[in-house]
Image (tube, grey):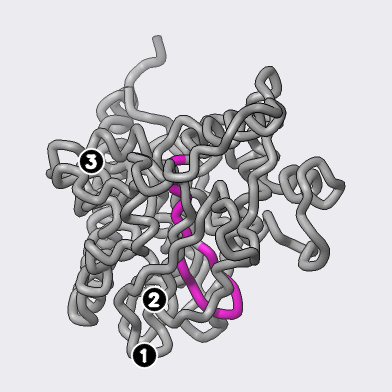
Amino acid sequence: APAPATKERPRRTRATRAGPAETDPTPVFQYPPGVAASDSIVVTRGDLRRLEPDEFLNDNLVDFYLKVIVADARRSPLGEDPAFGDVARDVHAFSSHFFTKLREGDSRGKLKPDSEKAQRAHARVERWTRGVDVFAKKFLLVPVVEDLHWSLAIVCHPGELAKRAVARERRELDVGATEDEDEDEDCPARPCVIHMDSLRMHSAKKIEKWLRCFLEMEWRKRHSDEEPFTLRERTARAGGPPADLLLAMPKVPQQTNSCDCGVYTLRYGQEFLARAVCRGARLAVDGRDVSLCFRDHDFEAWFTGRDIAEMRRDIKKLAADLELEKIRAAYRREQAEDAAAPPAGAAPP
């Protein structure tokens, strides 16, 4: 039987810059296609106009294509890699609304675990992780949109982070225990936040602070039967112990215009996963990688401005293909309904 038609309701979108491109709320297609889900995205005619050159991507487009990259084997640019299944298993991509809601209205004061401020922050975003254990993932992709600009934060090895933090706090309670001073350099999976920004405009330290708060509170909420932890921060003292969650800001390709930050953010995610999960996972994000800020991997040579223009065209073509798929599916449903209908003038049974 044909799938029941679903009423598409475009969600309100947040444009990176207001302008004439986002004026038409007419639904074009729903992604993923099929029966509507709570996290499905309805792409509108106004959204698609933002795929033209010199236009800013909005949250609908960033969320849509990030889903394609991470979870759509048929349409992802990484889909033909034999390890693509590991992407869907090991990676979680947050909505572009996640970070905005996390820090919404709480810009001042320290984020101490279990404080009212931390609890409010987590309460604003906890619905985004009801169906996923972020500590079972290797990488969390967090698109950030602030001040009319996009950047990407990647939380690496959150499960290892929880394991190390709990073990450290146990050692600290053991008076006779000593800290393993050289564990960082040899660590095969070093927890960190990698921040990639095509204009070096966002505060990476602020982003790391809020993500650290989220991880502390998320562990308390989702793993309440286990010991809580408080992540150790960086110290200004020379020779002091390292932070549990390091911050890495590798040199990455920079945009040369004022409109492509959203496409750069998507490309950062694609290129990172291509190396950290696919293609033999040569980018391990280990202790050496993080301590050298990924100097051995030359993030800056990942792609060019020409690749960004081509990626914009690829997303536009994919959107056109999805619109055509929707039209064809609607036609097939009509044909099936017509075939099932009794002939005109036929006596009722």
Q: In the rendered image, which residue does mark 1 sit on? A: 257
Dot 1 and dot 2 residues touching (CB under 8 Å): no
Q: Residue at point 44% right, 52% down?
A: 141
Magenta residues, as a range? 144-157
- Residue 93 visible in the picture: no
Q: In the rendered image, which residue does mark 2 sit on? A: 49
Amino acid at circle 3: Ala
Q: Secondary structure at mark 3?
A: loop
Position in image of residue 330 (x %, y %): 32, 44
Question: Does residue 50 lie above or below 90 as drawn?
Answer: below
Position in image of residue 83 (x %, y %): 19, 37
Residue 73 is marked as: 3
Q: Residue at point 59% right, 41% down?
A: 128
Apparent side of residue 314 relative to residue 131 in the rendered image (left or right): left
Q: How many residues crowd mark 3 within 10 Å: few (<14), some (14–19), many (20+)?
A: some
Q: Is residue 154 magenta?
A: yes
Among numbered discs 3 and 2, the one appearing first in the sequence:
2
- Residue 109 visible in the picture: yes
Q: CA distance from mark 3 to mark 2?
A: 26 Å
Q: For marks 3 and 1, give the one nearer the viewer.
A: 1
